[in-house]
Amino acid sequence: MENKVVLSGARPTGALHIGNYFGAVANWVKLQEEYDCYFFVADWHALTTGYEDTSTYKENITEVVMDLYAAGLDMNKCNIFLQSAIKSHAELYLLFSMITPLSWLERCPTYKDMLTQLSEKNIKTHGFLGYPCLQAADILIYQADFVPVGEDQLPHIELTREIARRFNFLYEEVFPEPAPLLTKSKVLPGLDGRKMSKSYGNTIALKDRSEVLTKKVMSMITDPNRIKRTDPGNPEICSVFAYHKIFNEAEVEEIQSSCKAGSIGCVQCKKNLAAKIAKFLEPIHERRAYIEANPKLVDEILEKGNKVAILRAEETLKAARKAMKIDW
Ligand code: TRP
Ligand code: SF4
């Protein structure tokens, strides 16, 4: 019997940060042990909001593949591929675009959100509106059983299921409905306390090494009411403390009480954290150094993944064409 299929994608926004790691990639590393996994770099998706400036397009793809490798994805345990190398995603996207009511796309909460958030960008485009339809093609073309995503992506999975149902109803039963695998992620705030995001410039990159790392940790926002070292602090409103919970479980309670008692300084607390993060990232940095020294490995990883993905995608597409009676 075939293993259950897991599929997920990451936009190539450049080097991955530790928010991406704990929010998604760490989970992928676990899933590769158990499932038939397809993980891809969603480079066409990056165009939906970034079509105006493609100058870093290629290097961003390389960065992400290197980071996925560094994080522990193993090309012998999962397939890592590039969306734009699998042209059949585009054909299925076109077919889906014929059957997807505009209202489904217009009412998508991520669509409305991003239009307001990215108001400085001209994203009133066909491609941006149709982005969830492309995502549906990404998922359904592999007949995925599970799609690990964060909460923000749930509406897209629901839309994917609706498109599958509509196709199956109009033509023939071709697409199984995928289920989301909600990633119960530990939430890491950014350096400034807001959500960690490349566009806010408040990230710690997976590849940040000790000097940069320490500098970033030292710049983190702490309890703003602590002015003197002896002022009692409130760790619950401090980002540094949120990080200790993840990277330094052994000392969490001690830090909590000494912060509250005002018996530990923020500088000391941050230095401690920086050391713990550095320790955590050590094996990731080792793998990153290896792939940087062997850049051909990036091509090898993608070539292998693309090959497997193309075969599986083509098979589904054939069935879709046949169901629609457009397979002459
Ligand atoms: N939309 C996802 C994001 O912005 C990326 C993505 C594209 C994806 N296609 C996918 C995720 C398919 C899961 C499955 O993060
Ligand atoms: Fe935050 Fe640590 Fe300072 Fe307390 S002592 S406010 S936990 S940095």
Image (spheres, rainbow, N blue to C red):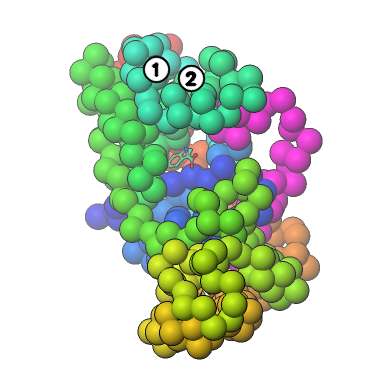
Query: Bounds of the magenta span?
Result: 45-71
> In terms of secondary structure, where does tag 1 sit?
helix
Whether residues under marks 1 and 2 lie with C-beta atoms below 8 angstroms apart, the answer is: yes
Question: Which percent across, then down, holds residue 165?
Answer: 24, 25
The residue that disc 2 covers is 129
Quadrant location of residue 211?
Answer: bottom right
Please indicate whether residue 198 sits to the left or right of residue 314 in the image: right
Q: Quadrant of residue 313?
A: top left
Residue 232 covered by magenta stretch: no
Q: Which corner quadrant holds the N terminus?
A: bottom left
What label sits on residue 125 in the rendered view? none
- The amino acid at mark 1 is Glu
**Comes first in the chain, label 1 or label 2:** 1
Instruction: Name the one closer to the observer, 20 or 67.
Output: 20
**Amino acid marked by disc 2:** Leu
List the residue tagged with mark 1.
Answer: 106
Residue 214, visible in the rendered structure: yes
Whether the residue under disc 2 has CB within 8 Å of ligand 1: no
Q: Is residue 129 above or below residue 198?
A: above
x then y, percent, for residue 198: 62, 48
Residue drawn where x is 59% and y is 60% of the image: 191
